[in-house]
Amino acid sequence: MLCVTAIAVLVSACGSGAPHRVDSEELNQEFVGKIFTNLLIIGVYQDRTFRVSGETSLAEEFKSRGIAASPSYDLIPDSGAINSDAIAGIVTAGSFDAVLTIATLDPGYDYDAGDYMATRGVVYMLGGEPGGGTDLGSMIAWAGSGLYTLHVGLWDAETQKPVWQVTTDSESTGSESGDLRTLADFVVTTLHGKGLL
């Protein structure tokens, strides 16, 4: 059964070119060759504004790539009510054949100019410049790197079994819309490559 605890997937962050890299991945061989054509997108987030924005943007990104996708926030308004029974009814009513779940496991830390101003004196006292020159400088450089961890899962609507799950190492593009665009590119390219879209 599809359950919220199973939705919590992981993605560690490392920077290297591509905004999203596979850290770990599982593919259920039972579904190899099954093509999914209508996705329900569920962002597993407590912040409703963030959830609405993310789901809507991702659905639009998928549609722009020729894949039918719909946000779930109107269908399941309370993120605490996301469970297998609620999803089963919605999936049937909406003719969805798959559910795509996205969760941020580690949001990272956005080290901004205010943080720099607050800590630069400590870095100078330790004999370095903010950056790679000191241990604290290295930590500051990492903290502001935009690295974060995601879990993305694709679930078969009929059986409620996981089809594909991935943990990614992700790096921010510097904008929410850019991050969502690159996430859609990553998911579509990966699922096309596995013959699931």
Image (cartoon, rainbow, N blue to C red):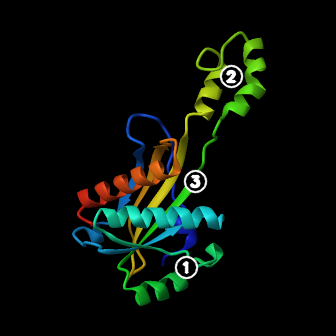
On screen, 88 above or below 163?
below
Q: Residue at x 50, y 81 (%)?
A: 87
Q: Which residue is mark 3?
A: 105
Q: Secondary structure at mark 1?
A: loop
Q: Which residue is mark 1?
A: 74
* Mark-to-mark CA distance, 2 and 1: 45 Å
Q: Residues within 10 Å of mark 2 (few under 14, many from 20)?
A: some
Do the CB atoms of the residues marked 1 and 3 lie less than 8 Å apart? no
Q: How far from the left and from the top, in percent, is residue 135?
A: 65, 20
Q: From where the camera sits, is residue 130 visible?
A: yes
Q: Residue at x 30, y 62 (%)?
A: 65
Q: Amino acid at mark 2?
A: Leu
Q: Amino acid at mark 3?
A: Leu
Q: Is 89 left, or right, of 186 in this rendering?
A: right
Q: Is 153 left, or right, of 47 in this rendering?
A: left
Q: Is 88 left, or right, of 76 in this rendering?
A: left
Q: Nearer the viewer, mark 2 or mark 1?
A: 1
Q: Nearer the viewer, mark 1 or mark 3?
A: 1
Q: Which residue is mark 2?
A: 136
Disc number placed over residue 10 in the picture, else none: none
- Quarter in which the C terminus is drawn: bottom left
Q: Amino acid at mark 1?
A: Asp
